[in-house]
Amino acid sequence: MAIIADFHLHSIFSDDCSTPMEDMVKQSIELGLKYICFTDHLDYDFPKKYGNIFEFNIPNYYNEINRLKEKYESKINIYTGIELGIKEEVIERLDTLLAFNKFDFVLNSTHLVSNFDPYYLEFWKDKTEREGYCKYFDTYYSNICLFPKCDAHAHLDYIVRYGANKNKNYSYIDYKEYIDRILDYTIAAKKMLEINTAGFKYGLKNPHPHIDILEAFYKKGGRLITIGSDAHSPEHISFKFDETCKILKDIGFKNYYIFAERKPIELEL
Ligand SMILES: [Zn+2]
Ligand SMILES: [Zn+2]
């Protein structure tokens, strides 16, 4: 088998993406994918200084996905997901959002640490690389506990894209105490750990999270995973999925999951 589902895709509904949904769908069909899920960014109250507004019109989102679902029905299954940027101040708004809107799949993402985006240098100016990574893992842990109404925990350790030395001085062992509690909670709460292949795109030679972390997760009994490329443009859809499939199988994983109406469906690796 190969990975035939990409469950983390962006489109023009995300403020950092200009690709029309239909272009993402066409390319996914071209690549032979059978299941895709749009997970556009919704980060309520994203700091204005960064110039992005990660919010969009939900009815328009449904309409466009439904139009494409019908048009490409015989070729691919399209799902309606969302990537939620979590922070304490917006939990109530997120609860309301999910109470009034039905999604197939909800990603819990940490994009901000104390309201700073680690993508920008400003975050790093008063801390060492290690301090920055530790703060990110702390925030990630708080966020998954704060907002359990999600299906999967996204891109654990993507912070290592942004440190001055990226992942050169980074290893699971050095951050074990921070990462283990995230893995333990994920397993206990029966949430999915997302395997996010965008790490390769940033030259990291591994997906998020790092292969050592995936091994630790497996050893602890973790079996629930979703897989997504986090593509913002067609050329990155299902990026390095073959390599990722091999990594996962070598560790021992046999299955991965997709979601329909918030319910997991098992697929074979
Ligand atoms: Zn994200
Ligand atoms: Zn994303």
Image (cartoon, rainbow, N blue to C red):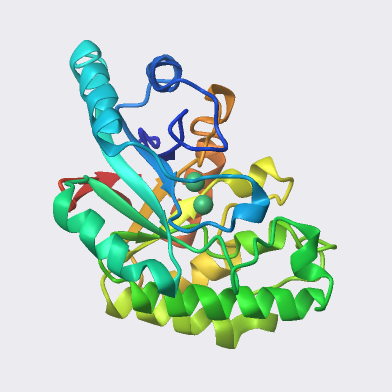
Which residue is depicted at the point 29% across and 71% down? 148
Q: Quadrant of residue 73?
A: top left
Quarter holding the N terminus is top left
Q: Is residue 59 positioned above or below 195 on the image?
A: above
- 152 on left or right of 15: left
Q: Measured from the top left, where is residue 168 in percent x and y? A: 81, 64
Q: Is residue 122 positioned above or below 207 on the image?
A: below
Q: 105 or 206, which lies in front? A: 105
- Residue 53 seen: yes
Q: Measured from the top left, where is residue 218 in percent x and y? A: 42, 70
Which residue is depicted at the point 47% across and 53% down? 195
Which residue is depicted at the point 24% across and 55% down? 97
- 263 on left or right of 7: left
Q: Quadrant of residue 88?
A: bottom left
Which residue is depicted at the point 44% across and 22% down? 24
Q: Measured from the top left, where is residue 240 in percent x and y? A: 57, 37
How many discs appear?
Answer: 0
Q: Quadrant of residue 128?
A: bottom right
Question: Which residue extends farthest bottom?
Answer: 177
- Residue 7 seen: no
Q: Measured from the top left, where is residue 269 in percent x and y? A: 35, 44
Q: 127 or 197, which lies in front? A: 127
- 248 on left or right of 205: left
Q: 231 or 18, which lies in front? A: 18
